[in-house]
Image: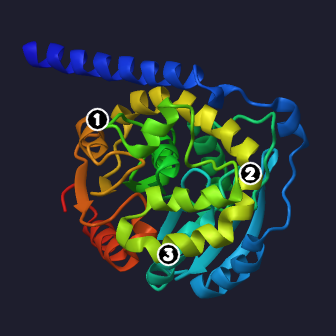
Amino acid sequence: MNSVSGVARINDAILAELDDMRARYMATPLANIDHSKLAKWRPKFTLWRCLQPLMEIQVGLKRRVEQVGDHKICYWAGGNSAGPVLVLLHGFGSSKENWSFLAAKLRRDYYLLIPDLAGFGDSDFNPDADYRMAAQADRIAQWLKQLGVEKAHVAGSSMGGAIAAQLASRHAQLVDTLCLMNAAGVPGRHLTQMESGIAAGVNYLAPTRARDTYLVFAIALHRRQRMLGMLLGFFMAGVMSHRKVVNDFIFSQLIDSLKDTYLNLGAINAPTLVLWGDSDQVLDVSCADQFCEQISGAKAMILPSVGHLPMLEAPTLTARVLGDFWRAGTRVI
């Protein structure tokens, strides 16, 4: 009884912390979305558009589009058609291209499906749509069903991790195994640089000016990846600053989704690997323990000298760890 009541008290404290996090966010200027500007927003040509075709060639997959409800979903597909299906879900402010380094190492053994999540990348954005994590998970489930996928390995990064967790809890029949990679959905024990900024009314992941994009990658990547961060900042500066109002809107729905995501973790039955970089300054590495406490049988692996984006920073190591996990097919690695 004492053990049960102790767990209940911990859960109540975490739920209260998530409520407090949302309340602090709502009290900042970040929560004040300009809906008239949002309604007028349209994609535009940026330097990033020039790099995308080259990344598609590098990854060796094909660009496709599928209508899912009121959104056109753009995605990459390809690899080993005889292999297990692998679904990769990117994080906030990102796109399918975030997976290009890792996907190139996995395509020989797996059939890959890598979408631009609704509202991001080349997929549609609708200012009246619901972009909370449960709604995004339902869209992914519908997309997979339309493609004829009965079961898949699912890995999600950051926001994509929260969506993957919701997918595993809401549509368990579709998820063979689950990897939560530096995932959103639980609070950490330590304040990160990103979280400190949010408390001060600054979202470093949604830069206002093009030159601020370099700071996004300075925070997201380990310091040894400085050159990679500068390169990504150069190519993505235009598109990220142009998307500012859209990213602020979707981020507010992400914040609003954290409690619901946490409450659904206990319903996950799929074998789960929680993968984290030890130097993450977006979501603290201690979040990995929280996920393992909530998901039955989940195990964590912490990657040394890696930040928030293992698939970009250490694609070879990440591919090896994931491959071992998928081949093992159990809850214990």
* N-terminal label among 1 and 2: 2
Judge whether 149 appears above or below 69 on screen: below
Q: Residue furthest left?
A: 2
Mark sitting on residue 228: 3
Judge whether 308 appears above or below 23 on screen: below
Residues under numbered marks 1 and 2 in contact, where contact means CB atoms less than 8 Å apart: no
Q: Amino acid at mark 1?
A: Gln
Q: Amino acid at mark 3?
A: Leu
Residues under numbered marks 3 and 1 in contact, where contact means CB atoms less than 8 Å apart: no
**Residue of label 1:** 294
Q: Secondary structure at mark 2?
A: loop
Q: Is residue 206 visible?
A: yes
Which residue is pictured at 41% across the width and 57% down the height? 308
Which residue is pictured at 45% across the width and 25% down the height? 21
CA neighbours of label 3 inside 10 A, class few (<14), some (14 to 19), many (20+): some
Q: Secondary structure at mark 1?
A: helix
Q: Secondary structure at mark 3?
A: helix
- Displayed quadrant of residue 239: bottom right
- Name the spot of residue 226 as percent of width and height, x first: 44, 72
CA neighbours of label 2 inside 10 A, class few (<14), some (14 to 19), many (20+): many
**Residue of label 2:** 243
Q: Nearer the viewer, residue 170 or 264?
A: 264
- Name the spot of residue 138 as percent of width and height, x first: 62, 42
Which residue is pictured at 10% across the width and 19% down the height? 3
Number of on-image labels: 3
